[in-house]
């Protein structure tokens, strides 16, 4: 399959899955088709505010299977389906990615080549506010070349984390 055909297939798959997955409260973050011998691997990454549970990934997998079984988009060649949640290694490229990572530490490379690491304070459709070493830095998305969430093993607890802990303790 040529690269152009693969891109068209990926776009068509994303278009067919968008509404059914949105009905489950999920956003499509990525659709990838990778050759694997005589088969192909179709990976669909999903996400939502608050993160995705394993049950939601299972429900999304059933829905993707249902939609693709009723479609000719994957053709006759066999494929393996993998539905996953968005990994922390994926760059932040959309306003919803920033919103979903509020409170997280992010390394940002700017279009001018400089970089900074800061905690996401707040974001909207145009910009993000970062706490960089105790100083607030407002950054327009247009100034961002690349942004990645940094893995923290001793992440400070936020008020949101405390709320989750309290609810779990009451259950």
Image (cartoon, rainbow, N blue to C red):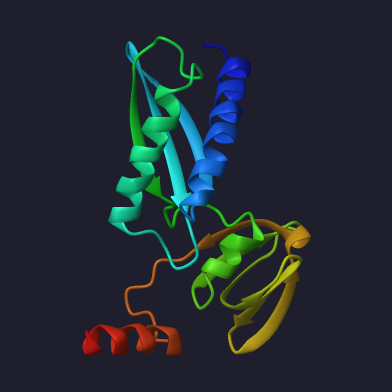
Whole-percent x, y for residue 4 in the image: 63, 17
Query: In this rendering, is residue 106 above or below 133?
Result: above
Instruction: Please name the residue shown 42% across and 63% down the image.
Output: 51
| In the foreground, 117 or 165 | 165
Whole-percent x, y for residue 145 in the image: 69, 54
| In the foreground, 128 or 136 | 128
* Residue 166 visible somewhere in the drawing: yes
Total number of numbered discs in the rendering = 0
Instruction: Please name the residue shown 44% across and 23% down the image.
Output: 70
Instruction: Please name the residue shown 35% across and 40% down the image.
Output: 61
| In the foreground, 2 or 21 | 21
Query: In this rendering, is residue 159 above or below 96?
Result: below
* Residue 27 visible somewhere in the drawing: no
**Quarter of the rendering occupied by the C terminus:** bottom left
Whole-percent x, y for residue 37 in the image: 32, 13
Instruction: Please name the residue shown 34% across and 31% down the image.
Output: 81
Query: In this rendering, is residue 100 above or below 1?
Result: below
Query: In this rendering, is residue 79 above or below 124?
Result: above
Q: Where on the picture, by quarter, is residue 19? A: top right
Whole-percent x, y for residue 152 in the image: 38, 72
| In the foreground, 86 or 111 | 86
In this image, 131 relative to 72: left or right?
right
């Amino acid at each position: 399959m040529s690269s152009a055909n693969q891109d068209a297939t990926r776009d068509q798959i994303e278009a067919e899955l968008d509404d059914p997955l949105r009905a489950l409260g999920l956003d499509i973050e990525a659709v990838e088709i990778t050759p694997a011998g005589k088969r192909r691997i179709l990976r669909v990454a999903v996400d939502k505010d608050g993160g995705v549970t394993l049950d939601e990934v299972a429900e999304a997998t059933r829905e993707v299977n249902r939609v693709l079984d009723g479609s000719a988009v994957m053709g006759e060649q066999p494929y393996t389906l993998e539905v996953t949640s968005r990994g922390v290694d994926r760059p932040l490229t959309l306003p919803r990615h920033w919103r979903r990572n509020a409170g997280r530490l992010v390394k940002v490379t700017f279009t001018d080549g400089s970089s900074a690491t800061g905690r996401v304070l707040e974001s909207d459709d145009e910009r993000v506010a970062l706490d960089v070493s105790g100083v607030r830095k407002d950054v327009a998305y247009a100034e961002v070349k690349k942004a990645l969430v940094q893995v923290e093993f001793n992440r400070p607890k936020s008020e949101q984390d405390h709320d989750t802990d309290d609810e779990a303790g009451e259950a």
